[in-house]
Amino acid sequence: MPLKNVSCNRMSATVSQHMYMIIDKVLDTVETVRDLGVIVDDRLKFDAHISSIVHKAMVRARLILRCFVSKLCASVIGIYEIRSSHT
């Protein structure tokens, strides 16, 4: 049974000159891979994953802050305090 659209990569913790192949296709060597939504690098560290999450949180925080007319921290904190006291 032939495989269609082989999307495999090779990740190695050491410098290796070996070429790995699947069905006459050389596997690309990558430094990071995303699996089940988690980014892992070739040293099995999660630095890229954490950076990605922090970046997304900063973008969302900026979008939320753009919705407010006032940029004063006290007024923004006051809104959250009012919301949390009603729950």
Image (tube, helix red, strand yellow):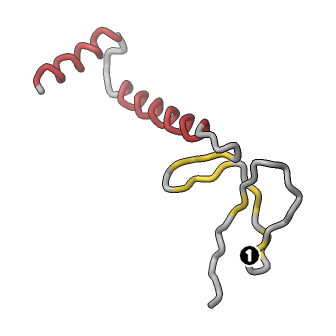
**Picture quadrant where residue 62 is located:** top left
- Quarter holding the N terminus? bottom right
39 relative position to 61: left or right: right
Name the spot of residue 61 as percent of width and height, x first.
40, 28
| Residue that lies at the very extreme toward the bottom in this rendered image | 1
Q: Amino acid at mark 1?
A: Ile
Name the spot of residue 17 as percent of width and height, x first.
89, 58
85 relative position to 28: left or right: left
Instruction: Determine which residue is flagged by label 1.
Output: 22
- Quarter holding the C terminus? top left
Name the spot of residue 5 as percent of width and height, x first.
64, 76
- How packed mark 1 is, by other alpha carbons closer than 10 Å (few <14, some 14-19, many 20 or more), is few
73 relative position to 3: left or right: left
Vertical position of residue 41 compared to residue 69: above or below: below
Q: Secondary structure at mark 1?
A: strand
Q: What residue lies at 13% left-to-right and 19% top-to-bottom?
A: 85
Q: What residue lies at 31% left-to-right and 22% top-to-bottom?
A: 68
Vertical position of residue 60 compared to residue 86: above or below: below
